[in-house]
Amino acid sequence: MSHTLDLSHGDFTLPGEAGYEQLTLRLAKKWGADTIRDSDGTQLSPEIVQSGYAIYSTLCLVRSVQPWARVNRDKLQQNFLMSFPVVAEKAKTTITLLAGFYTEQFVVNFGDSPKRWWQVFDRTTGKEVAKTKWSFNAKKGTVTIDGTVPGHRYTVNFLAFRIWEEISMYNHLTNNWGDREHLAAVDPMQPETQKVLLAYLDRWLREHPDTKVVRFTSMFYNFSWFWGADHAKLRDIYSDWGDYEMTVSPRALTLFEKKYGYRLTSEDFVNGGLYNSTHNAPSRRYRDYMDFVHDFVIEFGRQCIDLVHQYQKLAYVFYDDHWVGVEPSSPRFKEFGFDGLIKCVFNAFEVRLCAHSTGAKTRELRLHPYLFPTGLKGEPTFKAGGNPTLDAKNFWIDARRGLVRAPIDRIGLGGYLSLVEPFPDFQDYIEGLAQEFRLLKSFHRGDRPWSAPFKVAVLTAWGDLRAWTCSGHFTPGVALYDVLESLAGLALDVQFISFDDLVAKGVPKGVQAIINCGRAGTAWSGGHYWDDPRVEAILTQFVQKGGGLVGIGEPSARPTPGQQFKLARVLGVDRETGERVANGKYRFAVPPAPVAPHFITADVTAPLDLAKETDGLFVLGGDTQVLAERDGAPRLAVHAFGRGRSIYLSGFKFTFENTRLLHRALFWAASRDAAWGAWQSGNVKTEATYFAKAGKLVVINNAGTDERTTVTLADGRTAKSVSLEAHGIAILDV
């Protein structure tokens, strides 16, 4: 590494704010910013724009033409909603469509042939009610059903316009913006809308000569977010970061039918009220619709980006908010022609998500906390009771694990810069954080950190399209999030494969261990994809021939008579849900507390903390070794199968100790336990990464306490001792 490396300046985007010019320019210098941006709700004054810094300007096209949107309400974005179920009491039942929904977000679309697009269901029988049996009243906002059966549940799938765009709504209510205008999003699939948006963009580009980077926030369609009428008790009726529900319109459905040769119905989107959550295994029809929308977003998006380039400006896209249809992990993402990708991050797996994308030259992280008075959950941040410095430190320490493993080009913040003025300790911390980022970035130039001598694959229904995520930010109770957070900082080459990939191409070359983690029926465990017997056969043979399988929660779950897990014979473990009361269960040897001695458990010093665990587990025979148990059920078990190995965990939670446990488990499953040790840190609260070309060993302390550790070098014998302050980092020449 060059001794002239400047860690004090560059690769940092600062949010400026008109009216706070001195603060903006002072912090730009202190934090080493080379770029200043505006944010939702802020503007940049001429003094800031002309101060010599590069300027990022945020632009949300679908919210940009409000005067036109107000007089073209039929061109607003819409989606299907399912009414709350109503239990019939008589032979005629009336349902108020928006009862329970936030009526400042939605209005019912009665104008687009309800009898063609809507559906009414008897949810007790699961059958659609004939269209001749129901009628609608636009004035009252109701549907009346004739011939209802008392005691049966009825719902209506209906189209609704969204009259308040979700991010505008969230920012408005979070910041108490009072009587500020409620912004609506227009539908870009309408030809008239496209002309209006392109004309607006052309005019905007002419009016912003000082803008270097147009930061699209994001493209056209927001992730799904349906708000309830009672914000205190049920604000989020439905929220999914990767769902395409918000893209639907009669025009979209008509164009889809013309292209694919079959018609989608409202129930393809509503799905009994589950909608198309990314957490659930998708249908082929839904995947076709996703491809259809992706095609459109690329086609129209490219027109917008080409226009930006005509004005000699760069086009970046924000990997959140209106990102649906952009799909930065898609192999087609490069067709947009974006110059940069920006992702907001809370943790390590989101860093890896951003780094994983190809097709944009620059990848930038927007760090947290966002400069708002409160956080995403309403907790105080930059207000009384908040501690933004501690928040920033916690977010950074989590994200840093991913930054050590994968290259990122830039970092920055967003929001109201004025809020940081009363927090000088926050200002100082961000200065040091920015310098630490520049140092880590320097190691990735022309180099890759050392990784284990085998590849790991995570098997889900989505595969690489949802690499390094499940659905947006961390969701408690979804074990795969915790697994991804552990993997994000480990010295492993991780791939993401789908069941379709597995059937079409087999296990990828070099993969020696596969992880399948999730609850039964989910996209993460696999759900209906296990109905294909080829999947079971391929994975069974993979382990038989020497491969490794790590199953967590309800891996391969697809119940059949006598068996819950399709790969039960490979895992040596299965689950029962009450149907095996009359069947005996093998009595395994109870391991010592907290765990039985094994290569996998060598660093475990306390009872396993696996968060929400699967119940009803039992082992199939004496060749399954239980390493940890609770109340007579296995929590951690290993099993030899053919020439391969499998490991079962009843749950998973991201902790330092569990991360080490998973790391060892993957080495053992891959039959590479003899290779364990190289570039390993002995203290589980610390992690080591080696950059061979630079000859640098980076050791980070993930704990809030001072720690000492010993790092074993490549030969597996030589070691270096390191002392680290709380959350500290050490750089060693090796």
Image (cartoon, rainbow, N blue to C red):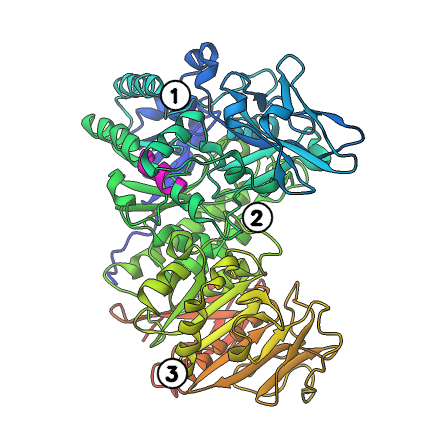
Where, by quadrant of the figure, is residue 286 drawn?
Answer: top left
Mark 1 vs mark 2, foreground winner is: 2
Q: Amino acid at mark 2?
A: Asp
Above or below — where is 200 with respect to 349?
above
Q: Earlier in the sequence, mark 1 or mark 2?
A: 1
Q: Which residues are magenta?
A: 289-297
Q: Which residue is mark 1?
A: 45
Q: Amino acid at mark 1?
A: Ser
Is residue 585 found left or right of 440 in the rendered image? right
Is 62 situated left or right of 579 in this image? left
Q: Residue at x 52, y 67 (%)?
A: 556
Of the residues shown, which amino acid type is indicated by label 3? Lys
Instruction: Describe residue 348's horizontal placement relative to residue 407 as left or right.
Output: right
Q: Please name the residue that numbered disc 2 is placed on.
A: 391
Secondary structure state at the residue bearing disc 2: helix
Please tell me which residue lies in front, 720 or 297. 297
Which residue is disc 3 drawn over? Answer: 545
Q: Residues within 10 Å of mark 2 (few under 14, many from 20)?
A: some
Q: Is residue 295 magenta?
A: yes
